[in-house]
Image (tube, helix red, strand yellow):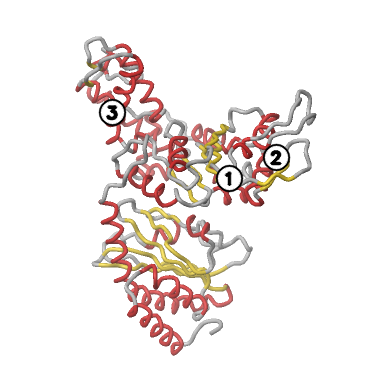
Amino acid sequence: MAGVPTAAQRLQLLSRISGRVARSDQLDEVLGPILRDLGEVAGLQRVSLGLFDTRSGVVQLEAAHGLTPGEVRRGRYGLGEGLIGRVVMRPDGGGLPSAQVARSIRSHPHFLDRTGALDAGVDRGLVCVPICWQGAPIAVLSAYRRAMEVHGLADDARLLQAVGGLLTPAIVGRLRADGEAREQPVTAPSGILGRSRVMQEVFSLMGQVADSPTTVLLTGESGTGKELVAEALHDRSPRRNGPFVAVNCAALPEGVIESELFGHERGAFTGALHQRKGRFEVANGGTLFLDEIGDLSAANQVKLLRVLQERRFERVGGNTSVRVDVRVITATSRDLEAMVADESFRADLYYRLAVFPIRLPPLRERTGDILLLADHFVERFNRSHGRDVQRISTGAIDILTAYHWPGNVRELENCIERAVLLARDGVVHGHHFPPSLQTAEATGTRPHGSLQQRLDAVEEQIILDALKVNRGNRAAAARDLGMSERVMGLRVDKYGIDPKRFKKTARER
């Protein structure tokens, strides 16, 4: 069937899909063939299904026909983000979400192109329809059509809605199974602590990828434990008996890193008195962990890409290829997608590294783990420093849980070590922490001023934070805070805030 199908052909296709669903209620078994039918039989392109997680408010593509696995993983949309994210939003007056149709993705203001539909330079039409259960969205079915055939998008929307209805029982079963699995605690890898939901998700992802040779990209702020996760992935892999070699790309000078990674031959440069194996050779049969991969220079990015593609390289000063069998795990605290956008990081290398990304949450997103970690560090430093601290006081606990932890777990570890060294009565108190953590009561710095002055100070900080997040865009900041642009303008004038400085900061970052 080529082009836009006729009504009779659509009915025939629905009958075929209905037969597939009748033979199996398992989404994993029927989804691929159904998406393929929609692509090959109905003439649709890049047909995909995204599941909606009501807890996080995120639609994540589950499967697609016409997209690569990497493109499917990049298909992640928050509530209201892009056309797919807008599909799961309820109308202001209530009711069910409605379909989103774009006759031209190139010119549509809400199209984000996270899966690279415009990469070929071809314009298309797009239709996205919600799949609902008991009055709430649970998934989004979407497909593209060639620009010359966009007159058929309305019929495509009706076809996708009908297919969504047939898929609903299988999707509901899948979501229920996923929910039950999430409720079961995931065994934490040795050496990594965490009972919070976000860490349970990290442990689940680690369990799925540990046994495979897949390249893993660990992202997250500094101090979140990326090297610990890399070691745990190695220890749970078939390569556990091989070497684990860690390299911090940011700590090595530009002129040294190539020799460190790939080795050198005798006489390759001044001071090269002997042949030396690089980290790739040392890690042969095991795992190579490249930390702060975002700091790698453009020239070394090219060399790394070649090794990942061909599994071979030449030592510096040599012309003989060396083959290696190494699993590569990389990590970064930088925004690689933004670096790809501004061309400071190679897109082809990024997609090669980000085959299986795992984001490690900052400590402020897992506050339920703070006391667990603090108790663990108290025990560790009791042993290493010969102390006998028995507990953390209530006031100290309040400080730990109220602090925002910009340095994450590493900062918490350092604070607990300091407190254990200072404690004299077997108890960690608030005054044992650095001044940056202590409350007004612990430091004797209670705030002064009237109630209105204190409220104004809080309001000013909220306005500043909203403008910073939105890079000085007053309209966007106003929407985030649920106020009108006029009220936002009055508050900006009242506190003498210059939104332009946040735009400057964003560009400099």
- Residue 120: x %, y % from top left: 63, 63
- Under mark 2, the amino acid is Ala
Which label was assigned to residue 326? 1
Residue at horizontal 52 percent and vertical 52 percent from the top: 355
Q: Residue at x 70, y 44 (%)?
A: 322
Tell which residue pokes out farthest to the left in this image: 394
Q: CA distance from mark 2 to mark 1?
A: 21 Å
For disc 3, the marked residue is 402
Tell me the amino acid under the disc marked 3: Ala
On the image, numbered disc 2 is attached to which residue?
299
Q: For residue 479, say whether it is visible.
A: no
Residue type at tag 1: Val
Asked which secondary structure carries label 2, the reply is: helix
Mark pair 3, 1: CA separation: 43 Å
Q: Is residue 444 visible?
A: yes
Left-right relation of 102 to 399: right
Q: Nearer the viewer, mark 3 or mark 1?
A: 1
* Mark whose residue sits in front, 2 or 1: 1
Q: Residue at x 27, y 47 (%)?
A: 185
Where does the image place residue 390, in percent across and percent down from the top left?
22, 19
Residue drawn where x is 30% and y is 55% of the image = 54
The mark nearer the N terminus, 2 or 3, is 2
Q: Secondary structure at mark 3?
A: helix
User: Residue 189 or 442: which is nearer the viewer?
Assistant: 189
Q: Residue furthest front?
A: 241
Residue 265, above or below 397: below
